[in-house]
Image (cartoon, rainbow, N blue to C red):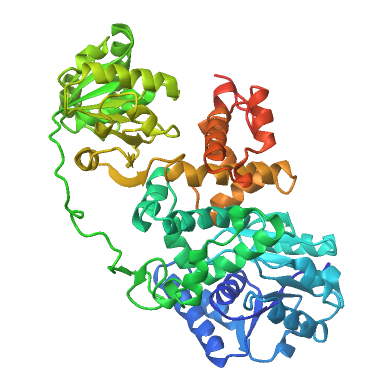
Amino acid sequence: MDTPLSTIAVVGLGTMGTGIAEVLARAGREVVGIDVSEDAARRAAASLASSTARSAARGRITEEERRDVLARFRTSRDLGDAAGADLVVEAVPESYEVKQRVVRALDGVLRPDAIIAIGTNALSVTRLAADSAHPERVLGLHFFNPAPAMRLVEVVSSVLTDPRAVAAVTDLAHALGKEPVAVGDRPGFVADGLLFGYLNQAAAMYESRYASREDVDAAMRLGCGLPMGPLALLDLIGVDTARTVLEALYAESRDRLHAPAPILRQLAEAGLTGRKAGRGFYTYEAPGSAAVVPDALTPKPGGEGGAAPREVASVGVAGSGTMASGIAEVFAKAGYDVVLAARSPEKAEAAKARVAAGTARSVGRGRLTAGARDAALARISPAGSLDAFAGVDLVVEAVAEDLEVKRGLFAALDRVCRPGAVLATTTSSLPVVACARATSRPQDVIGMHFFNPAPAMKLVEVVRTVLTGDDVHATARAVAAGIRKHPVDCGDRAGFIVNALLFPYLNNAVKMVQEHYATPDDVDAAMKLGGGYPMGPFELLDVVGLDVSLAIQRVLHEEFREPGLAPAPLLEHLVAAGCLGRKTGRGFREYARR
């Protein structure tokens, strides 16, 4: 185990095995790719030839370097050809029986100091190591797909693994240009342990018809900056693979949030396993294609028709904070006349000044012309009383996230606003219907959940209650489109789409650290490098505020009563200690005081 890992065998030349072989050959290792299928071996060699040819054509490597890479890779159908390897990376199908056969066979082929790396994200490395005559040399090595592009590698130790094997493989990962994260042996490890619970909840949300597949995916892309929506990602991973991982997670955690959503079984048993089958949650041009094609569930252009929206020319924005000023800016830049009302004229003027400062920065960065800025500011009329909303067509409230405060505001709006005015709340966690019931016109009340910062974020969750009128719903969608936002429809329940999927994921990350399975740094690195997330969960928690996160998690737990949604005790303790994130200088990390 102290020898350099210069000769490496990759057993299994599917998509992942082929990618791993390419990474190793490009990094100067001698690689033998082994697969019982001659076609798989041929495809692997062709894939390496094709990818290196593209690299050479783009000037990333020379022709001589390309020839050297190809010369370092050979294929075989005989496991005995792994005899001279310092390390074997297995990448066969995710099955105990198949992997056990490989591990046992390698015992009769390899020298005792050669390392066996199990490629799994759901099976127990410890159980597989126990089947080996040399369990101390067996560990897990979890690459992410596509292996040449993804930087994260999870190095998985069992209680039987020799630390020297872990050190050797960790050094190799660094030499390959990867970011290794050391983890213990439990299903999903770090990245998939967090990712698949989120994917499962998204599948269940869609299955319950709470939101369409397009709206679920758009909400998480636009609301969280994720590279793919969860249902599209399930199709990419493979619905059958996701179900296998979730079964393993549930067997360990007994958390119902990990129990595979029934739709995953239905799709898998029907052979609708995602892109590789040409159909899963979406329909694709052909098996293996990434191109989505319309099907019976695809929304029709221009919507389904139905009620006509009400005319909206003027908008009232209630509040004086960051969200209120941001929403006022959005409407003013889109050409609406805006009344910005706060509890006093001074607060209203301060809110407009915040708009002026924000638009000035946009001008400085070349995103807005000075003329457009001046025109937008001229459309905003600050007011110190809600009475100024008497003639507006739409009111959007952005006051404190407190139900009694909002109910009081809606009762006041009911008295002030003209008949037919649409009344919208920007709440992210409170019941919209409670605001509606504070008025004598609940049919005119709807949720329009903007995301912070409102001028930059494209998403608006349009939240319809059981009392909302069809024309009011149509109005909210039309207005959102008119201010160049992307509206998604959802019902009036805790968290709507984004927070209902985001905050349980954040809460589970806290539990992972609380259980001393991983550090905040390792978890953040895993989700950014392995999942393509713009921020790790602990970075995001500190930005959002631990108190805000705790409040939302409590609302979700109260609504759904799932034990797995109970706030992590560590999160509660930090909030009780006043460690709320960046705003207090300390949360999961410490920050310099301003």
Which residue lies at the image location 59% right of the left edge and 43% below the top edge?
Answer: 565
Decide if residue 412 is on the left or right side of residue 204. Answer: left
Q: Is residue 455 above or below residue 150?
A: above
Which residue lies at the image location 32% right of the left edge and 22% below the top edge?
Answer: 410
Question: If the image is split into quadrants, where does the N terminus sit?
Answer: bottom right
Decide if residue 573 is on the left or right side of residue 312. Answer: right
Confirm whether residue 378 shows in the render.
yes
Residue 436 percent across, percent down from the top left: 33, 29
Camera-nearest residue between 299 and 538: 299
Confirm whether residue 320 shows in the render.
no
Question: If the image is split into quadrants, where does the C terminus sit?
Answer: top right
Quarter location, residue 549: top right
Residue 487 percent across, percent down from the top left: 29, 44
Quarter location, residue 151: bottom right
Q: Is residue 348 above or below residue 313?
A: above
Q: Is residue 553 above or below residue 512?
A: above
Q: Is residue 212 above or below residue 277?
A: above
Camera-nearest residue between 415 and 347: 415
Residue 413 percent across, percent down from the top left: 27, 19
Camera-nearest residue between 591 and 430: 430
Number of numbered discs visible in the structure rendering: 0
Decide if residue 329 is on the left or right side of residue 267. Answer: left
Which residue lies at the image location 14% right of the left edge and 44% below the top edge?
Answer: 308
Decide if residue 573 is on the left or right side of residue 417. Answer: right
Residue 19 percent across, percent down from the top left: 55, 72
Camera-nearest residue between 299 and 383: 299
